[in-house]
């Protein structure tokens, strides 16, 4: 297709005439040349608008350029014909229906109002942009020609480019020599017209080949040097010849540099030379006027390297300046106007074609280039092009200004770019200015002087504080990232949300010291964090690299956004690929440990870092917070590598143009601490962002990949330095390809001197000394553009000590962003942390063999073998690159270390350096500089915050004032470095020193500098905590408001008042009023004789002020002066001075009300200061002692008994001797009065010291345990309540004061705040009182009471463990004496062993178990501790012995009398729970007495109904010791369970077999427990034998047995097997022989004592008694059995005359079997407890042994067998339950036995246990966790059972929740109920008419009143806590503003609340009107009142919401749904 514009071009007049020389514009004015009259300007304008021939379109069409009008018209006609035929073809094709319809549907949309609306990009669906005004994107796009101008008016076709040096010369001529200025301009104009005469085009270079350099003669000695160059046109479509002016110089200044220029330009190729030398034919034949030639775009030609040309240093520098440093601009009208107007502006210079592509790029782009390659220039020119395009297009169109933002991390770079941009814009605007306009142009001064721009307040920059406040005129905007982030944060964090306020502090610039010091920079990290890390972690690590890894990778990488806390977790960090993250690839564990240590310390210090800030804003923006303000159209990010990767997301969010992003940077320069950056990561990250945004846009859009550009031409340095620097990049890319972005090789435009490497020098070499220090002791001095670079501060100080102040010395980090002509890199390798062995890895990159080095020197380690080892070299090389690229002309490397050799060898192998040895000539380093150069260098260093170096430069320039200014800033840097490191006093001295220096600088300065220096001095004084001097400095800075505030902070209220008098009009009214108020508060709160007269205008104002702010000190004096003591007392109370109030009340003891009021206050104070846990010695402290003294002054007869006893309670404890009896009596009284709080207080003092009960009697110990249980149960009640704090008594007891429903305070030194497990609260242990929420105080109280309960019970348990009463000495009870002097058992005579003694022993065990259970219930987790399990097992063993004593005289289970045991039912419940738990947790592997333990537990569980636990216990099913298997597969524990449970037929046989194994295998077992098991088997055998012998009710007739043998109805089963009795008798006989033997049998043992011979005899007697009773009760025909037993007993008789049979069983051995019963009875005569029972069946025909009736044997008459257990227990209990406890029988999981049908067990009835109570769960039964030992195996349950269980759980859970909610809302409900009762009473009394208002009156009104009362209560408390005078005395004047403001606000709010309460009270006149509208207004007023109350108003909002919904909210009337229309579409009208 052809462009129509080309047709118009063809119609252009091609008649071109060369302008005559005599028609040149004249210089009409000597001072303002080149300006004509208005007519001439218009004529030039018309001429400019005439078209010139553009040959590019003709080249594209392949046609010749027409030379005449006729040719042009003919060509246009031909082209039009071709276009017509083409158009006809397309229109014909489009008109066919096959194409027309689909194309119309696809490309012509229907009418849609939203089609013009641009889709808005949304990061998240909830994120929105508030401002939706029109955007310049995509309307404004960069125009290719927008930046460039044609030649000046009147100039010819030749475009003229003029260099920087030539432009400077013109400026000098314009300023000093106008005549020369005109001559030069005239000559340039001639050249632009192609007048190439001999004088105008004389060749300078000696060569006649290559690219010629010309001179044009202007005067005798004035020459203009130029070249005919060939450059691309603006659109890049053609190349055009231009004139490039290099120099304006004298003839004598011409030198051979132009030969070098020709030599260099010839290297561009043959085609370039031809285009530069080609000339069109003359315009007129014969003359020398030529038009410029045009060419097609040049095809890149092969670069021809010409032979080297030897040049001197000066000539080389000149060539470098001409070709590299100089910029060439068009000699345009804008340039001329700028010269005429003497404006310091910048002009757009020529870019390379590649750079122009970047500027013209219409999509987003990435520009990568090394340092000095022009990245910032392309970015700035693109901004300028877009701005210029808008200016050219927007005239009259209303097009919005494009919003462009330039962002960088460096404030210096931002300021420089902005200044340069402004100068460029000024130059563009000069082109259209007239003479008068140029004369009126004001001078623009953007220089702020020698001030740190960071110090300038944001408000003075002209840029709003908030992003949303930006207007179009603010753009384009040049900002640092920090400033932009602050602006965004100011918008999104402008809320009252606490989190938002906290995050806001991270951004807002503040003078608050806490905010200033909370930001962690690298310096902060290195100085205040790194030394505190563990040395093993930091050893060998560089803090710089670690900080970069933490910020850049762990916290600032893209992956960190995936984590809630914004940091990578350890696994993610460790799994990062080492190739792309090589720095710490082998030390990730150490680095992450350092990160964790850093995070912990940062949280403790409440600091934040740069990553925290960005994450904070992103979290809010991505969480749904709206982005306020208009998004920008174009975003430019320079030095992007200095940002974190997550910063890119924040920047992307503010740009609405996906194609308006420009990212530039160089990852080889990432030496900024915290930077760890790659552009590949940025590209991938931003692409994912674009994909995410595209998914959330309203309309589909295509994601366009941004273009990537690389800039490889270095404009800063010459080739020698560039090549050396690039070799470093090659090393990084070779070894660590993923750690840096891969770019094209960097090259310089011209070659230059190679860097010099000084080698072979050492400290003893004289020439080295001369090189550094100069000769004859005189130091050399480096120039202003020379710099010495060292590694760090330590190296800098060391070098300065050696060489003195010879020049600018700075660290590599300080040099970032700076450039110098010459750089000396000193000891870089020597100071490196990388050792030589790792540096040698670079030798692996040497190609080929280097003959100059020994092969051993070139040996390199294998990099691939251990890549992580060399990671540090990568960072070192990046640092080395930065150092090299600081140099423009000369680079010197000085290093004596062997670590430098590998790099030197590497560079030498590539001929990149010049080695300088002592044998060679040392180059001259020092270069002199002029004072002006020193001053310029000083200013540059100053603005880069290199203050010490700036001081050096200013000193060389002899600028003492500037030296002092830089020194002041240096002092401030030193002071800032002390923060967090030095002592506070040292910090203050440092800041004071800096402040004094700034004051000095301010006194010498003027204007803005003066004000800024004083302002900075004030800020330093604030840091030094010297507010008075800060106020003086602010006063000099004319910051009057800040001055007054500083004076106020310093307490200089007189100066504050003076400033208010003189300058209040220059202050904000609010601040002035606030300061005046605080001055009033200060003077009125002090006892000062003279106040400033200007504080108040009238007495009424002062009085109102005192009342408003509650200055009660003055008001109290007023009351006392009028004798109103009651009012004074109440005012004392309002001031929280209760002692003074009591004294005031007691001044009138005749006033009963006053006395009772005094008593109430006294008790309240006593409870507060002498609360629970306060030791008696604390009563002697000042306040309690005073209160006790005042209590004795009270007339007690006027008080109630309750109050009287409470006062007496405190007096008793305060007495010198504590009377515990009185306290116990008082406790009993209080418990009767239901005052458990006072009772607990008394008992706590009773048990503060436990009594000595080592030898106490049973009765004494039982009494003690009962009292202690009451005490501990009261403690447990407090700890276990859901809401203990809800009760007033509990709050009183623990000194808890309720401020509101959800706010409490605790008295200082109270029990809750004291250290746990202490008997008293000392001064050191007390904590300050603070506010707690309801949940916090509840948890604290419960936890503290729980711990105290545990502590007290632990002490009591220790007492029990040492007490003798829990075990009885068996020897003493039987023999009446005990030979063991240290016997720890109680000595109870046999005559005292009655049933009461038995029950008492059982009782104290159960009581102690109840006490322990209270602790276990309070601490459920304790039950899982092994120590607690052992403690429980020990007490179970004690209890077992109490239930089943070893000797019959001590009692048996049949003697239990539950009515005599206090708390028996609860004790049994605890015991059963313990037994069950013990069974589950019993572990054979860890139990030394497992057999005894399991036998005891089997006995207890079977006796008390917990036998079902045995079915599932691990000790039965899983962990079964081999020693307890009597044969493979049969576990004797199962035998003993079956035996003791006695529920199956084989139970007797099982018991016999089990006992056989135990006895024969000599297993370790308790002897008493073993005898219990034998008696269990023998008793079952005797009963079963009788039942089998004579089935029926009389089978047990005439039987005489122990009562304990007959308990349990499972023994009454005739089906049991009795075949193995002989085996049992054999085993018993074996046991008897073992007991008789003299040897020690360690397998048989007893509790509390060793088994002595006497103990053996006791148990022999017990066994004999058992055998005798068995023999007597066997059926008569069992002769053999009786004989066997007789034989066994007789065998025990001693045959040794010297060894008599022990008397304890002698009678058994001597008696015949017929006398066995008589002997048994004889032995029992001395026993108090009757043991035997004679069974007589009623109505039997069998005979009865009459001899039994004469003995002391109880006769029991029965009718049925199942009556026997019940009848046995009936005489011993007073009450019993009719319910039965059913215990399922044990079912073995393995073995041959099977369960028979279970029979009912009446053990619970026989023991008198109330089954219902037994089954109650223990306190922690439901909450105690079940571990593996207690795990119950899966039980096969039916679906119905599972459903029922779930239902029970659900109902119980709901019940618990209801209880909890009821406790939580009980207080509010009570208050609401009281209000409702008042409303109901008034409604009934006043005959309130029925209606809607009555419903509101009785329904929502109580809720409204409750909300109002709660609000008033809270407001009253707040007012009471903001008393100004007291706080002023305690804290000083610092909080006066806050206190005054709070006092005023709360007073006003409280007044409003009381007024509302009066109006809305139930009996007010308000309700009589029944005005519903007025009631609605009242609800809104209450809502406003509650909103004004500070702090929490718990409960009030909920009540208000109920009232609001019922009264205010309009009810929605349900609308009647319309019926849908009948659907007739499916009906066929033709169907019938």
Image (cartoon, helix red, strand yellow):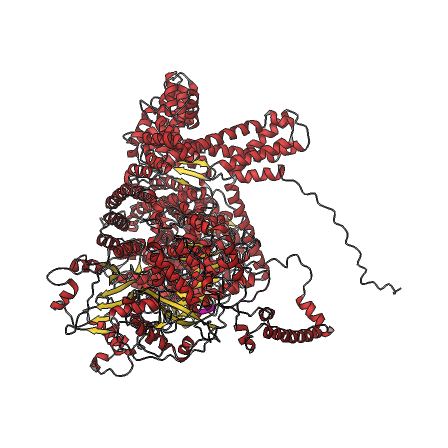
Residue 526 in picture, x, y percent from top left: 28, 57
Residue 1305 vertical placement versus 1100 (above, below): below
Residue 316 vertical placement versus 1844 (above, below): below
| Quarter of the rendering containing residue 1715 | bottom left
Residue 1183 magenta-drawn? no
Residue in front for this viewpoint, 1495 or 991: 991
Q: Total marks drawn?
A: 0
Residue 1009 in picture, x, y percent from top left: 32, 45
Residue 1118 vertical placement versus 660 (above, below): above
Q: Tell me the quadrant of the picture where the N terminus can be found.
A: bottom right
In the drawing, does residue 2021 fall left or right of residue 241?
right
| Quarter of the rendering containing residue 1663 | bottom left
Residue in front for this viewpoint, 675 or 1288: 675
Q: Give the range drawn in magenta.
A: 699-709
Residue 1302 visible, this orientation: yes
In the drawing, does residue 1075 fall left or right of residue 1321?
right
Residue 647 in picture, x, y percent from top left: 43, 59
Residue in front for this viewpoint, 1574 or 801: 801
């Amino acid at each position: 297709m052809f462009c129509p514009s080309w047709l118009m071009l063809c119609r252009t007049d091609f008649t071109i005439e060369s302008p005559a020389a005599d028609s040149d514009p004249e210089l009409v004015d000597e001072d303002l040349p080149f300006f004509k009259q208005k007519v001439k300007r218009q004529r030039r304008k018309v001429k400019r608008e005439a078209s010139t021939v553009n040959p590019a379109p003709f080249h594209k069409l392949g046609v010749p350029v027409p030379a005449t009008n006729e040719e042009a018209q003919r060509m246009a006609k031909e082209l039009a014909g071709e276009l017509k035929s083409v158009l006809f073809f397309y229109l014909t094709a489009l008109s066919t229906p096959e194409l027309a319809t689909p194309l119309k549907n696809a490309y012509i949309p229907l009418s849609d109002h939203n089609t013009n609306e641009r889709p808005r990009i949304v990061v998240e669906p909830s994120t929105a942009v508030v401002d939706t005004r029109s955007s310049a994107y995509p309307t404004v796009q960069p125009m290719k020609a927008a930046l460039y101008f044609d030649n000046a008016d009147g100039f010819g076709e030749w475009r003229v480019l003029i260099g920087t040096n030539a432009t400077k010369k013109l400026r000098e001529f314009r300023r000093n020599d106008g005549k020369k200025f005109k001559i030069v301009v005239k000559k340039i104009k001639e050249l632009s017209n192609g007048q190439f005469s001999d004088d105008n085009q004389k060749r300078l270079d000696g060569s006649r080949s290559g690219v010629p350099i010309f001179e044009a003669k202007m005067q005798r000695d004035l020459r203009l040097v130029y070249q005919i160059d060939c450059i691309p046109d603006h659109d890049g479509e053609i190349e055009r010849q231009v004139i490039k002016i290099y120099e304006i110089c004298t003839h004598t200044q011409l030198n051979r540099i132009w030969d070098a220029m020709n030599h260099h330009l010839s290297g561009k190729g043959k085609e370039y030379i031809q285009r530069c030398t080609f000339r069109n034919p003359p315009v007129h034949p014969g003359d020398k006027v030529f038009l410029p030639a045009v060419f097609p775009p040049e095809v890149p030609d092969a670069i021809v390297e010409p032979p080297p040309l030897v040049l001197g240093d000066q000539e080389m520098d000149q060539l470098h300046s001409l070709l590299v440093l100089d910029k060439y601009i068009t000699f345009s009208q804008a340039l001329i106007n700028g010269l005429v107007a003497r404006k310091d502006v910048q002009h757009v210079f020529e870019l390379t074609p590649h750079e122009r592509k970047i500027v013209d790029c219409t999509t987003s782009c990435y520009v990568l280039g090394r340092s000095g390659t022009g990245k910032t220039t392309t970015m700035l020119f693109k901004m300028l092009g877009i701005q210029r395009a808008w200016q050219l297009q927007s005239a009259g169109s209303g097009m919005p200004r494009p919003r462009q933002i330039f962002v960088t991390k460096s404030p210096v770079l931002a300021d420089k770019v902005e200044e340069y941009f402004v100068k460029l814009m000024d130059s563009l605007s000069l082109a259209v200015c007239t003479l008068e306009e140029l004369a009126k142009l004001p001078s623009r001064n953007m220089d702020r002087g020698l001030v740190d721009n960071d110090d300038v307040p944001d408000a003075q920059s002209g840029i709003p504080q908030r992003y949303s406040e930006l207007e179009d005129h603010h753009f384009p905007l040049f900002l640092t990232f920090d400033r932009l982030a602050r602006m965004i944060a100011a918008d999104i964090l402008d809320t009252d949300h606490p989190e938002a306020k906290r995050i806001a502090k991270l951004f807002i610039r503040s003078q608050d010291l806490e905010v200033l010091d909370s930001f962690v920079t690298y310096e902060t990290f290195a100085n205040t964090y790194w030394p505190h890390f563990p040395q093993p972690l930091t050893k060998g690590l560089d803090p710089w690299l670690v900080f970069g890894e933490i910020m850049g990778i762990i916290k600032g990488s893209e992956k960190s956004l995936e984590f809630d806390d914004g940091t990578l977790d350890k696994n993610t960090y460790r799994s990062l690929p080492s190739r792309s993250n090589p720095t710490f690839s082998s030390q990730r564990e150490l680095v992450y440990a350092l990160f964790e240590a850093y995070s912990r310390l940062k949280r403790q210090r409440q600091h934040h870092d740069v990553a925290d800030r960005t994450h904070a804003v992103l979290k809010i923006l991505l969480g749904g917070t709206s982005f306020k303000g208009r998004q920008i159209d174009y975003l430019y990010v320079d030095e992007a590598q200095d940002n974190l990767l997550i910063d890119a997301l924040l920047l992307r969010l503010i740009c609405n143009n996906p194609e308006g992003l420009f990212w530039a940077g160089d990852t080889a320069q990432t030496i900024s601490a915290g930077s760890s950056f790659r552009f590949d990561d940025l590209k991938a990250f931003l692409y994912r962002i674009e994909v995410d945004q595209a998914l959330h846009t309203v309309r589909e859009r295509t994601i366009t990949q941004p273009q990537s550009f690389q800039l490889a031409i270095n404009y800063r340095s010459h080739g020698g330095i560039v090549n050396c620097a690039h070799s470093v990049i090659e090393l990084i890319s070779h070894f660590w390809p993923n750690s840096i972005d891969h770019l094209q090789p960097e090259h310089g435009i011209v070659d230059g001197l190679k860097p010099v490497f000084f080698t072979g020098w050492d400290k003893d070499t004289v020439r080295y000394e001369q090189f550094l220090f100069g000769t004859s002791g005189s130091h050399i001095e480096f120039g202003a553009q020379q710099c010495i670079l060292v590694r760090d501060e330590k190296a800098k100080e060391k070098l300065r000590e050696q060489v003195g102040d010879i020049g600018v010395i700075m660290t590599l980090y300080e040099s970032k962003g700076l450039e110098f002509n010459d750089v000396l890199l000193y000891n870089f390798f020597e100071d490196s942390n990388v050792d030589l062995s790792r540096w040698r890895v670079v030798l692996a990159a040497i190609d080929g063999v280097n003959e100059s080095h020994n092969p051993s020197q070139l040996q390199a380690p294998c990099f691939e073998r251990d890549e992580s080892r060399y990671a540090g070299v990568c960072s070192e090389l990046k640092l080395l690159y930065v150092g090299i690229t600081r140099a423009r002309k000369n680079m010197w490397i000085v290093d004596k270390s062997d670590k430098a050799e590998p790099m030197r060898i590497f560079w030498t192998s590539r001929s990149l350096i010049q080695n300088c040895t002592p044998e060679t000539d040392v180059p001259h380093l020092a270069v002199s500089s002029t004072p002006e150069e020193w001053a310029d260098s000083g200013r540059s260093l100053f603005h880069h915050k290199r203050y010490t170096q700036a001081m050096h430069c200013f000193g060389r320039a002899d600028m003492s004032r500037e030296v002092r200014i830089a020194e002041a800033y240096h002092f401030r840097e030193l002071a800032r470095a002390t923060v967090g490191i030095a002592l506070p006093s040292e910090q203050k001295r440092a800041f004071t020193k800096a402040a004094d220096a700034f004051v000095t600088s301010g006194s010498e300065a003027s204007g803005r500098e003066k004000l800024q220096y004083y302002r900075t001095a004030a800020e330093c004084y604030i840091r030094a905590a010297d507010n008075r001097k800060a106020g003086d400095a602010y006063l000099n800075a004319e910051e009057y408001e800040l001055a007054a505030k500083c004076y106020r902070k310093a307490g200089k209220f007189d100066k504050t008042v003076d400033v208010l008098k003189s300058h209040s009009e220059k202050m904000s009214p609010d601040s002035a009023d606030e300061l005046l108020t605080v001055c009033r508060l200060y003077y009125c709160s002090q006892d000062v004789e003279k106040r400033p007269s200007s504080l108040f205008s009238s007495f009424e104002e002062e009085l109102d002020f005192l009342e408003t702010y509650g200055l009660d000190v003055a008001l109290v004096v007023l009351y006392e002066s009028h004798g109103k003591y009651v009012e004074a007392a109440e005012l004392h109370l309002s001031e929280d001075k209760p002692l003074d109030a009591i004294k005031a009340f007691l001044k009138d003891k005749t006033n009963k009300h006053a006395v009772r009021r005094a008593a109430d206050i006294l008790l309240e104070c006593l409870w507060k200061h002498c609360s629970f846990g306060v030791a008696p010695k604390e009563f002697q402290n000042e306040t309690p002692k005073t209160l006790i003294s005042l209590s004795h002054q009270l007339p007690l007869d006027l008080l109630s008994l309750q109050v009287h006893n409470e006062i007496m309670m405190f007096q008793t404890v305060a007495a010198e001797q504590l009377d515990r009896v009185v306290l116990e009596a008082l406790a009993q009284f209080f418990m009767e009065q239901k005052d458990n709080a006072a009772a607990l207080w008394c008992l706590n003092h009773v048990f503060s010291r436990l009594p000595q009960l080592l030898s106490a009697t049973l009765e004494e110990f039982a009494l003690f345990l009962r009292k202690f249980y009451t005490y501990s149960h009261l403690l447990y009640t407090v700890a276990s309540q859901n809401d203990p704090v809800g009760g007033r008594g509990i709050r009183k007891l623990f000194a808890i004061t309720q401020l509101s429903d959800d706010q409490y305070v605790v008295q200082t030194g109270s029990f809750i705040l004291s250290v746990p497990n202490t008997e008293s609260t000392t001064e050191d242990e007390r904590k300050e009182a603070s506010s707690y929420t309801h949940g916090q105080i509840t948890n604290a109280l419960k936890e503290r009471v729980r711990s105290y309960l545990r502590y007290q019970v632990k002490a009591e348990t220790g007492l029990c463990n040492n007490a003798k009463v829990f075990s009885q000495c068996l020897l003493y009870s039987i023999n009446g004496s005990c030979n063991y002097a240290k016997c720890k058992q109680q000595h109870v005579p046999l005559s005292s062993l009655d049933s009461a003694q038995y029950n008492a022993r059982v009782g104290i065990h159960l009581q102690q178990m109840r006490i322990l259970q209270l602790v276990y219930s309070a601490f459920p987790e304790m039950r899982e501790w092994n120590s607690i399990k052992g403690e429980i097992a020990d007490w179970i063993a004690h209890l077992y012995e109490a239930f089943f004593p070893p000797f019959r005289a001590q009692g048996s289970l049949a003697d239990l009398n539950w009515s005599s045991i206090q708390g028996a039912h609860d004790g049994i419940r605890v015991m059963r729970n313990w037994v069950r738990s013990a069974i589950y947790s019993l572990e054979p592997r860890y139990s030394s007495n497992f057999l005894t333990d399991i036998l005891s537990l089997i006995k207890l569980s079977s006796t008390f109904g917990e036998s079902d636990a045995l079915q599932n216990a691990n000790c039965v099913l899983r962990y079964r010791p081999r020693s307890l298997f009597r044969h493979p597969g049969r576990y004797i524990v199962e035998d003993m369970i079956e035996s003791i449970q006695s529920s199956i037929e084989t139970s007797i046989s099982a018991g016999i077999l089990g006992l056989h194994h135990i006895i024969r295998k000599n297993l370790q077992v308790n002897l008493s427990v073993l005898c219990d098991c034998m008696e269990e088997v023998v008793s079952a055998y005797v009963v079963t034998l009788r039942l089998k012998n004579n089935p029926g009710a009389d089978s047990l007739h005439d039987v005489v047995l122990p009562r304990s043998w007959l308990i349990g109805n499972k023994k009454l089963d005739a089906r049991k097997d009795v075949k193995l009795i002989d085996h049992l008798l054999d085993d018993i006989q074996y046991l008897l022989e073992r007991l008789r033997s003299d040897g020690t049998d360690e397998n048989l043992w007893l509790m509390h004592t060793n088994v002595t011979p006497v103990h053996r005899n006791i148990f022999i007697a017990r066994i004999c008694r058992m055998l005798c009773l068995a023999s007597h009760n066997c059926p008569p025909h069992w002769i053999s059995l009786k004989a066997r037993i007789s034989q066994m007993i007789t065998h025990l008789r001693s045959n040794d005359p010297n060894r008599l049979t022990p008397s304890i069983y002698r009678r058994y051995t001597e008696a015949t079997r017929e006398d066995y019963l008589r002997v048994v009875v004889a032995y029992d005569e001395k026993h108090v407890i009757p043991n035997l029972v004679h069974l007589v069946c009623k109505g039997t025909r069998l005979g009865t042994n009459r001899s039994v009736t004469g003995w002391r044997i109880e006769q029991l008459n029965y009718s049925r067998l199942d009556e026997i257990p019940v009848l046995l227990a009936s005489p011993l209990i007073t009450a019993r339950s009719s319910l039965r406890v059913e215990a399922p029988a044990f079912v073995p999981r393995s073995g041959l036995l099977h369960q028979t049908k279970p029979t009912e067990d009446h053990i619970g009835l026989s023991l008198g246990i109330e089954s219902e109570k037994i089954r109650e769960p223990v306190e922690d039964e439901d909450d105690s966790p079940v571990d593996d030992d207690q795990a119950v195996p899966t039980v096969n349950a039916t679906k119905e059972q599972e459903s029922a269980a779930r239902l029970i759980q659900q109902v119980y859970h709901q019940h618990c929740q209801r209880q909890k909610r009821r406790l939580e809302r009980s207080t509010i409900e009570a208050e609401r109920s009281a209000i409702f009762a008042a409303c109901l009473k008034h409604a009934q009394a006043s005959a309130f008419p029925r209606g809607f208002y009555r419903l509101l009156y009785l329904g929502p009104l109580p809720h409204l009143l409750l909300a109002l009362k709660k609000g008033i209560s809270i407001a009253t408390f707040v007012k009471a806590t903001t008393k100004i005078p007291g706080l002023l005395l305690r804290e000083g004047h610092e909080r006066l503003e806050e206190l005054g403001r709070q006092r005023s606000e709360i007073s006003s709010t409280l007044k409003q609340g009381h007024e509302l309460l009066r109006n809305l009270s139930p009996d007010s006149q308000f309700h009589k009107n029944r005005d519903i509208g007025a009631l609605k207004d009242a609800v809104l007023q209450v809502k406003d009142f509650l909103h004004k109350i500070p702090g929490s108003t718990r409960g009030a909002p909920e009540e208000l919401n109920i009232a609001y919904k019922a009264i205010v909210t309009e009810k929605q009337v349900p609308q009647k749904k319309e019926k849908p229309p009948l659907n007739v579409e499916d009906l066929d009208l033709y169907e019938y």
